[in-house]
Every structure is written in structure tokens, then in C-alpha cells.
Amino acid sequence: MEADISRILIPRETIARRVRELAGEIASTYGDEASGLLLVPILSGSLIFTADLMRELPFVMRIAVLSVSSYRGASTQGGTPNIVQDLKLDIRGRHVLVVDDILDTGNTLRMVMGKLAERGPASLRMCVLLRKKDKAPSDLKADFVGFDIDDVFVVGYGLDYNDQYRNWPEIAVLKPELYQ
Ligand code: 5GP
Ligand code: MG
């Protein structure tokens, strides 16, 4: 796997430090409402981020996963995202925090936030590990952002290329010849 990596964009210590800070931002934003929190990670990209983030959150909470199809390889053109596995519980009246790996075109999170908003949560916020800063859509504001990055295709720490490289522990860029 190491032979396929061209450069490390964000090393693991930097990720770990920022994830701890994000947890602090989340805890102070929710304040007394934190213990009613429902974390909604979008699979599979946010798997590792969520696992680390939730262990830094020092209060009782629930978690319910949502699976969205957004296959597009290394393309920067987003396809039409669909919920392929919906939440198994009712979010009405709950404080919902959606967690995703990356905000790129925003098509995925726009669809997810729209659908969840219709179900009457007490509050609905969004946390992303990464945001492509030059592409971030103006109509979709992330409440918590780990890192703003340039418009490059990254893998690792949960992010995939053709469903591989999710287990690479850092945010990295693959060698260009692999993106075929
Ligand atoms: P959006 O709908 O915002 O365009 O893209 C959201 C999804 O596209 C992300 O959840 C992720 O699965 C995928 N994606 C967007 N940019 C990247 C990237 O740089 N690397 C990887 N691995 N996936 C990306
Ligand atoms: Mg993906």
C-alpha cells in the first residue's frame, strides 16, 4: 500500500489533534443538550473519523448510521446520491449531528440534510473532516470542519479510491498513474 502513496497531506498526529479540538467545539456548541445527541455517520467514508471523534466526546449519546451510494471513483463530478440504508430510528425531537468524511460538491450532504430536516429533529448540524475550500457550495454550511484542503483527490483515514485505501492511517494522495 505504501508504494501507491505519492504524498501525505495530513499526518496522523495532526489529524488526532484536530479531532480532539473538534470534539471540544462540538461539546461546547451543544452544551446541556449534548447528552441527547444522536450522531449520524454517513458510511463508509466517515467510519474511521467517527470512531475517533466519538471517543473524544465525553457525554452519553446515541449513534445511528446512514449509508449513501455515491460511487464515482476519483471523479470530481458528483453523481446523484441515494440513501441505500436508512436510519433505524425516528429522529423527531432529537439533536442530530451528521458526520461525513468530506464536503466536496455538497450533493451528498445537501440530499441527506434535506431528507433529515423533513423528519423534524430538534436540531440538525453537520460535521465534516475535510472540506474542499474552493468548491464549498454557498448554500450548504458545515457547522464543524476538520480541515480545509485544496481540490485534490485524497484517500486514507476512511476515504477510498475504488473502495480501497480506507485503512491508510493518514490523509494522502495516490500516485497519479493509479487514477485510471
Ligand atoms: P460531494 O457529494 O460533496 O461531492 O462528495 C461527497 C462524497 O464524495 C464524499 O463523501 C466522498 O465519498 C466522495 N469524495 C469527494 N471528494 C473526495 C476525495 O477527494 N477523495 C475521496 N476518496 N472521496 C471523495
Ligand atoms: Mg467515497
Image (tube, rainbow, N blue to C red):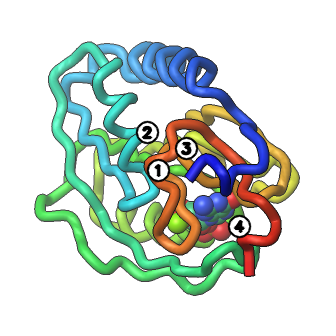
Give the residue at mark 4.
105
Circle 1/circle 4 CB separation < 8 Å? no
Marks 1 and 3, the one that precedes in the sequence? 3
What amino acid does circle 3 point to?
Answer: Val
Task: In the rendered structure, find residue 111 and report the number of the disc placed on it.
Answer: none
Q: Which residue is at a point 12% across and 64% down the rendered structure image?
A: 88
Q: Which residue is at a point 31% across and 29% down the rendered structure image?
A: 54
Whether residue 109 appears in this view of the structure is no
- Front in this rendered view, residue 68 or 29: 68
Q: Circle 1: is it few (<14), some (14-19), or many (20+) Cα within 10 Å?
A: many
Whole-Å distance between the Cαs marked 2 and 3?
9 Å
**Which element type, helix, strand or loop, lies under badge 1?**
loop
**Which element type, helix, strand or loop, lies under badge 3?**
strand
Q: Residue 56: x, y in percent?
A: 34, 18
Query: Quick check: is the Cβ at mark 4 less than 8 Å away from ligand 1?
Result: yes
- Front in this rendered view, residue 150 or 120: 150
Give the residue at mark 1.
158
Task: In the rendered structure, find residue 128 and report the number of the disc placed on it.
Answer: 3
Give the residue at mark 2.
49
What amino acid does circle 1 point to?
Answer: Gly
The part of the image, by quadrant, that contains residue 118 is bottom left
Whole-Å distance between the Cαs marked 1 and 2?
7 Å
